[in-house]
Structures are given as structure tokens and as C-alpha cells.
Image (tube, rainbow, N blue to C red):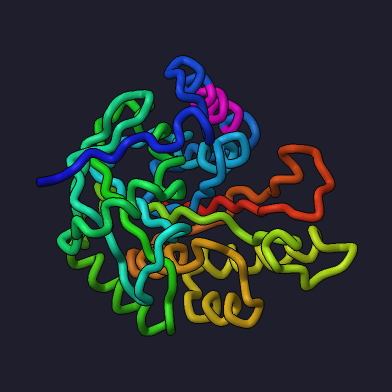
Amino acid sequence: MNMMRDAQYAGSWYPKDPELLRLLVTESIDESKKRKTYQRGPYRFAVLPHAGLFYSSSGIAPFFTAGLGSIERILVISPSHYATLPPDTIVSAPLSGMRTPLGDIQAFNLASAQREWFSAIQSEHALEMVLPYIAAQESPVKVALAMLSRLSEASAIEKLAGQLIQELGREDLEMGRTVIIASSDFTHYGPRFAYTPYGSRAEGRVKEDDLSLAHLLSEGRVSEALAFCTAKRSTVCGYAAALLVSSIAGRMQCKGWVADYYTSSDVSSSHDANFVAYSTILWR
């Protein structure tokens, strides 16, 4: 028996009131259209942030600026912040759908979905932040939710990529009927995150690191991106999902680019020693 995922973070990480939430979604998409030219979609793959929508709406919105068009299915893959996952393993749970304040979303399920992972899928905020944006679209799509936290080596990425392509269907991925979103924030910096390798120029150095990684991902240079994360002891929380999406996008010969980059300090105008960075990567 499949289960419904509740809107766990409505009312805390984003508005629970449907009118306020729809306004937030609509305004962030409209603002994104004004700031940059994204109308080359619909997009086939993406890396999008997953902080509370006060921070992440600006980074999520670009994916939706061109609408969903002929997209029929969206697979969202995030890290697990609350449950320990085995390395090199995608986990999922059988769902009938996902509740949002803007209406329910129908689900499709991966063949590997297991009921034992439902609690982890339910509690994971990194899977939820994009759901109101999907629910707000006129195009009816089905969504699958999965998590991937750790990768041991580049060969594991290629193996998982091959398995997903086979399961989701190469033609559906090539034609853009099925798309994959990797949910990932970028560097978490400061004493709160036990990551302080830089001095007074921390934000500038972090930006250099993050954009280097983002460009490697956008270009499909997966082995280099994994080596970069390992060498930097990166605190990019969803790097595994981002590497997987980068690998599949490369196999589909998609063109990727870094569409946005900013930090929590930019949003809040604070100078806190602790900050989180966000990058939006799109492929078409």
C-alpha cells in the first residue's frame, strides 16, 4: 500500500496559507524572469537549493520560468539530513502522492522504493521545498522522491546513472518528458558547520570554490567534481545527487550552465560568521 507524504514544513519553512504561498511562488518566478533570461526551457535537468523559501525561492524559481511544457515526470533527489543512508545507494519509498498547501501532487515510484524509508522521505526538508513550485504549475506532472547521500568513487556514479537511465527510459530523458532535479545547497561555512578554512575573505574564497564546482558539474566533468569535493572536504550537502544528475545530463548530451549564485548573507543582509551558499544549475 502506497502512502501520502505530508507537507511537513508548511507553516515553518514556507507559508502554510495557500494565497501567501502562491504569491511567494509567483513573485519569485516573475522576479527571476526580470533579472535574467531563462526562457530557453523547459529544462531537462537541474541542481536547485533547498533552504527555507525565504532563502531558496530565488534559486528554485529559475527552473520554472519557462513552464513545464511537455514534462510528464519529475524525479527529485536530495541528500538525507536526518537518516543515515548506505553509500552509493539511492533510497525511496512507495508514495501515492505528496500534499502541499497548493494541492496534492501525484506520485510515480522507483522500482527500488521500500516502505522502510518512508519516515526518512517524510522528514526530509530537502525534498519538500520544490514541491509547492511544482504544485503551482498548470501542467499536471507526477513526482518521485529519492535520497542519495554519499558516493565512494566515480565508478559508483556511473553505475547509478546507468541504472536510472534504464529505469526512467532513455527516450523519455532525451525528449524531456522525464526530468531530474538534484536538491542541494552549496558550501556551509562557519563555526556552526565546523568548516572555517578561510580567513577574512571567506565569502570570496567560498564563492570561488562553489563556482568552480558548479562549472564542473554543468560541464559534466564528474570525476573532477568528485575529486574537488574530496580535496576541499566540501560541505556541499547534496553533492552526491548533483554529481549523479551531472552524469546523466552529460550522457544525454545536454548543455548546462550556472544560472545563479548567492549566499544567505546576501538575502538577509547580515555579516554573520555562518552562512550558506546556493547555486542554480540548469541543463537543456
Between 218 and 27, the one nearer to me in the picture: 27
Q: Determine which quarter of the picture holds residue 187.
A: bottom right
Give percent across and percent down for residue 84. Answer: 40, 67
| Residue at 52 percent of width and 66 percent of height | 217
- Horizontal relation, residue 19 to residue 178: left or right: right
Give percent across and percent down for residue 96. Answer: 17, 41
In the picture as drawn, the residue positioned furthest to the left comes out as 1
In the picture as drawn, the residue positioned furthest to the top comes out as 19
| Any part of residue 171 in sight | no
Q: Is residue 18 above or below residue 128?
A: above
Q: Is residue 257 above or below residue 64?
A: below
In the picture as drawn, the residue positioned furthest to the right comes out as 200
Examine the structure image and report whether residue 203 is included in the region drawn in magenta: no
The magenta segment? 24-32
- Horizontal relation, residue 280 to residue 118: left or right: right
Give percent across and percent down for residue 220. Answer: 47, 70
- Horizontal relation, residue 22 to residue 75: left or right: right
